[in-house]
Image (cartoon, grey):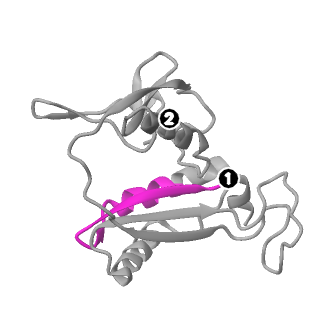
Amino acid sequence: HPGLRQGFGLFETIRIASGRAFLAGAHAQRLTDSAPVLGLDPWLHPRSLTKGLDRLVAASAVREGALRIYLLPGAPPAGEEATEGAGEGSGTAHGSARARYIGVISALAAPRPRQARASLSPDRRDPRGLLVGVKTISYAAERLLLARARASGADECLRLNLEGRLCEGTRSNLFLIEGDRLVTPPMAEGLLP
């Protein structure tokens, strides 16, 4: 598939708790809102997508786990040629084929630790970057940073922006409990919504 070969597509990871997709509607909306950035046509309305995700989770019988939903181009991204072996229905080089939604469910393998160790990334996130706020399937940098963090004994690697302020982890969000308030970095710092 052209999106998978080139790391060109979007995804959302949704927690499954007590057999339900947690905040599935908000994730469906973010996926839909992000699609135009990559020139994808999200042909399912977020409400329809949410209903489909709920049905998928119910059919899986997974009580605790994660649902990952992908939105991939139905044809090569604009400006790319179709590759050899592109069969019937794979689209044209002009991206006219319908985008594809793919859902993958996995059960929670082990309980999450109550505490975690984190390292700081040497790589800085540009809050004005082209893809800031968009969850693309191009996660090579995050995977490398996480692998380096784990090699040094940490569980996660925290990302800083160009100004040196915390914005997010490679695979986690940052929250601080301050009295009775829950505080997280603002979107302007370069994190995902």
Q: Which residue is mark 1?
A: 7
100 to 192, vertically: above or below: below
Residue 98: x %, y % from top left: 69, 70
| Lateral position of residue 16 relative to residue 147, left or right | left
Image quadrant where one finds the N terminus: bottom right
136 to 150, vertically: above or below: below
Tell which of 9 and 5 is nearer to you.
Answer: 5
Residue 83: x %, y % from top left: 86, 64
Instruction: Name the quadrant containing residue 91.
Output: bottom right
- The residue drawn where x is 63% and y is 56% is 9
105 to 29, vertically: above or below: below
Instruction: Name the quadrant containing residue 24.
Output: bottom left
- The residue drawn where x is 41% and y is 20% is 165
Give the magenta range. Answer: 9-32
Any magenta on residue 28? yes
Any magenta on residue 4? no
Residue 149: x %, y % from top left: 44, 34
Marks 1/2: CA–CA distance: 22 Å
Q: Amino acid at mark 1?
A: Gly
- The residue drawn where x is 43% and y is 44% is 171
Q: Which mark is residue 148?
A: 2
| Lateral position of residue 94 relative to residue 39, left or right | right
Q: Earlier in the sequence, mark 1 or mark 2?
A: 1
Residue 99: x %, y % from top left: 66, 67
- The residue drawn where x is 66% and y is 50% is 38
Tell which of 187 and 11 is nearer to you.
Answer: 11
Instruction: Give the number of the mark in front: 1 or 2.
Output: 2
Q: Amino acid at mark 2?
A: Arg
- Judging from the image, what secondary structure is the residue with disc 2 in? helix
124 to 118, vertically: above or below: above
| Lateral position of residue 79 relative to residue 13, left or right | right
